[in-house]
Each structure stands twice: as structure tokens, then as C-alpha cells.
Amino acid sequence: MDVPFVVSIVIGIAAVWAALLVVFWIFRPKNVAVRELVRLIPDLLRLLRSIITDGSAPADVRIVLAGLMVWIVSPIDLIPEFIPVLGPLDDVVVAIVALRYTRRRMGTEDLRARWSGSPNGFELLVRVIGSG
């Protein structure tokens, strides 16, 4: 095995990941406090469970969301969790990408129909993942 080649691939992946983190930081909704986003987590988990367990939801969406859940609970991360701010940020990036994919495939109205939280909570979620 060519060690320099493997090292260059790892560095390349880390560079792409760092670039994605910067892009999502720049384009994040400006008027959203982290505290507000944290309050959405229980409703968001219910939404994900609803989609993953619903056989009528597109299979690719269910796979992406199940993969998201595995990614979040996995102890293996590109950026270790113990690094302040950046550690949990990779999970946030993956979650936003997965939820944007879900919204594109299923539509905002289908997500709204499955949302069990408050209307304000759903509007905040849409601000974070985009409306279409």
C-alpha cells in the first residue's frame, strides 16, 4: 500500500470537510440562536422516526435518514467531539444535508404534515434546511 497516497486522500477528505463547514457557517440562518435549534431536537427526532418507519416514504429518503441517525450516534467522526465547537459541527453539517435532501425529495408540505411540534418550530426548521 502506498502510504503517501493514502495520506493525501485523508488530507483531501479533511480539506473538503473543512470547506463544507465554512460554507455552512457562512450560509447559516443569521437570526437563529443555538438554544432555539436545540429545542427542536425532540420534535425533529419524532419527524425522523415517522419518516423512517413509514413504508410509503421514498426508500432512498428512509435510507439517508437511517444513515443520519447512525452517523450521529457513531463514536467515529471526522472531527472528534472533544474539540470545542468544531466537534459537534460535523454532525450538524451531515444533518442539514440529509434534511435538505429529504425536503427536496418529499416536499415541505409532506414534512409539515408529519411535524408534531409547534408551527413556529416547523418554520424554524424550514429556515435552517431551506424551503425549496
Image (cartoon, helix red, strand yellow):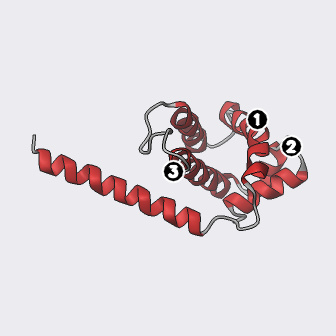
Q: CA distance from mark 2 to mark 1?
A: 9 Å
Category of crowding for the residue at label 2, using alpha-carbon neighbours closer than 10 angstroms: few (below 14), some (14–19), many (at least 20): some
Q: Are marks 2 and 1 in contact (CB under 8 Å)?
A: yes
**Foreground residue among 79 and 132:** 79
- SS for callout 3: helix
Q: Which residue is mark 1?
A: 46
Q: Which residue is mark 3?
A: 86
Find residue 98 and report its horizontal and vertical position in percent: 58, 49
Rendered view: 72 above or below 31: above
Of callouts 3 and 1, the N-terminal one: 1
Q: Which residue is mark 2?
A: 117
On-image quarter of the C terminus: bottom right
Rendered view: 19 above or below 40: below
Of the residues shown, which amino acid type is indicated by label 2? Gly
Q: CA distance from mark 3 to mark 2?
A: 28 Å
On-image quarter of the N terminus: top left
Q: Residue at x 55, y 38 (%)?
A: 63
